[in-house]
Image: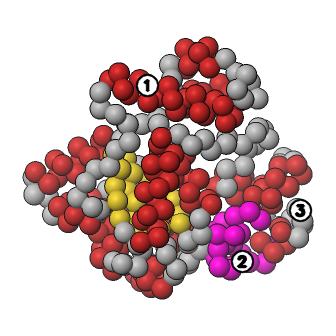
Amino acid sequence: MITTDFKQRIIAAINADSLNYASASKQAISLDINAAQLSRIKKGDLENVVSDSKWMSIGRRLGVSITNEKPWNAAETPTFLAVFGQLNDCQANSISAMICDIPDIGKTFTARYFAKNNRNAVYVDGSQTKSKQKFVRQIAKEFGLAHTGRYVDVYEDLVYYLQSAHKPLVIVDEAGDLDYSAFLELKALWNATEHACGWYMMGADGLRAKIEAAIDRKKVGYTEIFSRFGSAFLKVSPNVQQDLIEFKKVQFAKIVKANLGEQTNFSQLYAQTGGSLRKLNALAKNIQ
């Protein structure tokens, strides 16, 4: 049974999220409910509007903690500043870029944070939308567009929206997990929205290896995709091992300060987690 407190926190997240949509109907579609249900929820009607599973789904999508733990604050780490700046450039100028960097440095956190705080910017996880249809339908859903009808209609409506909306941005995380057909559809979407939509592709070393290998084999579409995303693999972390260690320590310290306070024993936490930001996040739940 979902508590009233949890529902209230979801409503607060819904109200904050509404700033990212031009209309309540678009937000409702993105939350997978209808406009009437959204209106009732915003008015504080908590019972018999949507199922408990739907409350959970909305809460998960909006990042609402089940245990009411303190939200993770953004810290101006080197990764945050670099990725946020690149995302801002892509959206402001309707251009495309691609970052391929080591995991666990805060790329995904920054991308989600940017999408949550910038209108017409959406985040899509390629590992959860591997096929062409799931990928395109998810982008449409994130923008608050119809996504459950005929695929050709969903695609054409999405293209029309991206061509006409004000500075849209699509962030594709875990892009290396996309199927080949999804990569080709991504290229088609880029072609259809050139100069009208910003695109930002994210992944780790596997994405770079996948694209380079496909280009070497002259696999159709990959040379064009690489060109459309700037013909470069952006990177934030240093290549030299000692520099990388210092880079991670700087990031770790900034995140600890922003979330746990200056009085926290940084050295002890770093030793406990090995400098892993994911482990720090998990460990911090017992400290807050």
Q: Residues within 10 Å of mark 1 (few under 14, many from 20)?
A: few
Circle 3 residue: 47
Label number found at residue 98:
none
SS assignment at label 2: helix
Q: Residue at x 76, y 39 (%)?
A: 70
Circle 1 residue: 246
Circle 2 residue: 24
Q: Residue at x 79, y 41 (%)?
A: 68
Identify residue type, mark 3.
Glu
Residue 185 visible in the picture:
no
Query: Which of the two marks, 2 or 1, is nearer to us in this view?
Result: 1
Identify residue type, mark 1.
Glu
Q: Residue at x 28, y 50 (%)?
A: 233
Q: Is residue 146 left or right of residue 243?
A: right
**Residue at mark 3 to residue at mark 2: CA–CA distance:** 20 Å
Identify residue type, mark 2.
Ala
Of labels 3 and 1, earlier in sequence is 3
Quarter of the view holding residue 200: bottom left
Q: Residue at x 36, y 26 (%)?
A: 243
Query: Which of the two marks, 3 or 1, is nearer to us in this view?
Result: 1
Compared to residue 148, the image places residue 163 above or below, namely below
Of labels 2 and 1, earlier in sequence is 2
**Residue at mark 2 to residue at mark 1: CA–CA distance:** 46 Å
**Residue at mark 3 to residue at mark 1: CA–CA distance:** 52 Å
Q: Is residue 21 left or right of residue 287?
A: left
Residues at badges 2 and 1 in contact (C-beta under 8 Å)? no
Query: Which of the two marks, 3 or 2, is nearer to us in this view?
Result: 2
Please state the horizontal and vertical placement of residue 252, each as a whole percent of the image: 55, 29
